[in-house]
Image: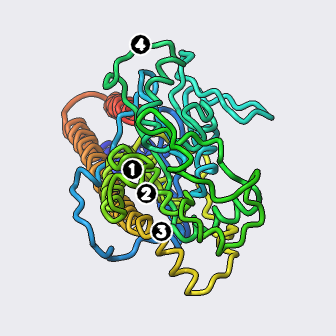
Amino acid sequence: MEEKFNRLIFIPIAAVLFLMIGYQYVCPADSNTCYFRSDEKGLFQRYSSGLELVYTEPEADEDLPSKITSRFNFTERDLDRRVDFNIRGDDVMVFLHIQKTGGTTFGRHLVKNIQLEQPCDCLAGQRKCTCHRPGKAESWLFSRFSTGWSCGLHADWTELTSCVPVVMNKRDKKNTPNGKRNFYYITMLRDPVSRYLSEWKHVQRGATWKTALHMCDGRPPTQDELPACYSGEDWTGVPLPDFMNCPSNLANNRQVRMLADLSLVGCYNMSSMSELERGRVLLASAKSNLRNMAFFGLTEFQRKTQYLFERTFGLRFIRPFTQINSTRAASVGISEKVRWRIEGLNALDMELYEYAKELFLRRYQYNRQRQHQEERLRRRQERQQRQRLHRTYLAELWRLGIGGGGAEEVEEEEVEVKVLEEVATTEDYGSQVVRW
């Protein structure tokens, strides 16, 4: 009787121990295989290639609108941007840096804030970092802070696409034909009015970018094709009306011009077609190039930019991006009439930015939905795995509990050994899943 009573007591105790062991194997104290959302930030943690990712969801002021107004027809291919970036192979990331779009900050993130097996080597006092592939003296990044202005100061899409393959093959001492290497272009865009005012303030302080090459179809523009807006060394102190009144000011529609294929409109030769037709071709080209780029971000959405970059390339940033709204452009007070004038001067950029913003937010929405689906699938698989282990344990417990013969100590030992074997096997499997 006492033996039967002890056996009945042993079964619930063993079940409780099993649940505790099972929980520890699924959610060990020193791992992030369990995902929990805090009430404040919604902090997600996971492991990738042995490196920890901490991604904080966007703050309240960056929340996605419940319904995005749709003006453009985007396909799933346009929204699903996943790049199998082979940093050990020949793949190259090319950053197209448009002036006053937050490109300097983003460029620093690329060289100083990405978790890499071999991080970029950034020495104090030097502007450029060495970003080599693991085990190779070859660069995986083409940007201002890695390779410098190798294709010219703030080179645009037209310049980069013809220059980068040649420069990178020469730097890496390769003779790879065009089309045999993957060049993944990325860029940042900004609200056109804010960007225009920021450029004006920058020029007002003495910036000129006059060493930019503006190469197109193998040659720079002539003085007649691109006349200067000022005489002298720079345009220091220029008032906003004078800045807006220069018809050859490259600040006008800069984002469209730098993203379009200028060879389609005769480069800087304004007489090759009408202004209306030229604008239509440039805008269509800029939209196409932007849509087909590996990635682009928006200055106004730093956290979403970080999230989409990480989802696109499978690379992780160490520190979260910071949204800074107190810029010089934000401090400039302008009348509604002046704003309309700036929007008119940048009509192509306004249309491009509206297109880019909808595409960007739809990509973010699409990726968040995909991430939630992946999380649900992972949790379902883990639940099924726990259920299988639980059924196996109960079956073995039932078999030993009702079987005849054998001392109680032997039965308990067999149960314990069986459970430990199951747990050890599952732990090994779970660790492999994390590594994969």
Label 4, label 2: how far apart the Cα atoms are: 33 Å
Label 3 neighbourhood size at 10 Å, few (<14), some (14-19), many (20+)? Answer: many
Do we see residue 412 in this rendering? Answer: no
Q: Residue 27: x and y, percent? A: 45, 47
Contact (Cβ within 8 Å) of mark 2 with mark 1: yes
Q: Residue 345: x and y, percent? A: 49, 70
Badge number at residue 346: 3
User: Of callouts 1 and 4, which one flags the residue occurring earlier in the amino acid sequence?
Assistant: 4
User: Of callouts 4 and 2, which one flags the residue occurring earlier in the amino acid sequence?
Assistant: 4
In the rendered structure, the answer to whether residue 206 lies left or right of residue 340 reads right
Q: Residue 166: x and y, percent? A: 46, 23
Badge number at residue 260: 1
Which residue, as the protein is rendered here, is positioned at the far bottom?
336
Say which residue label 4 marks. Answer: 175
Q: How many numbered tags mark residues here?
A: 4
Please identify, in this view, whether the residue under mark 1 or under mark 4 is nearer the observer. Answer: 1
Name the element at disc 3. loop
- At a point 34% along the width and 29% down the height, the residue shown is 425
Considering only vertical position in the picture, is 182 above or below 46? above
Name the element at disc 4. loop
Badge number at residue 256: 2
Amino acid bearing label 3 = Asn
Label 2 neighbourhood size at 10 Å, few (<14), some (14-19), many (20+)? Answer: many
User: Of callouts 2 and 3, which one flags the residue occurring earlier in the amino acid sequence?
Assistant: 2
Label 2, label 1: how far apart the Cα atoms are: 6 Å
Name the element at disc 2. helix
User: Of callouts 4 and 3, which one flags the residue occurring earlier in the amino acid sequence?
Assistant: 4
Amino acid bearing label 1 = Ala
Label 1, label 4: how far apart the Cα atoms are: 28 Å
Amino acid bearing label 4 = Asn
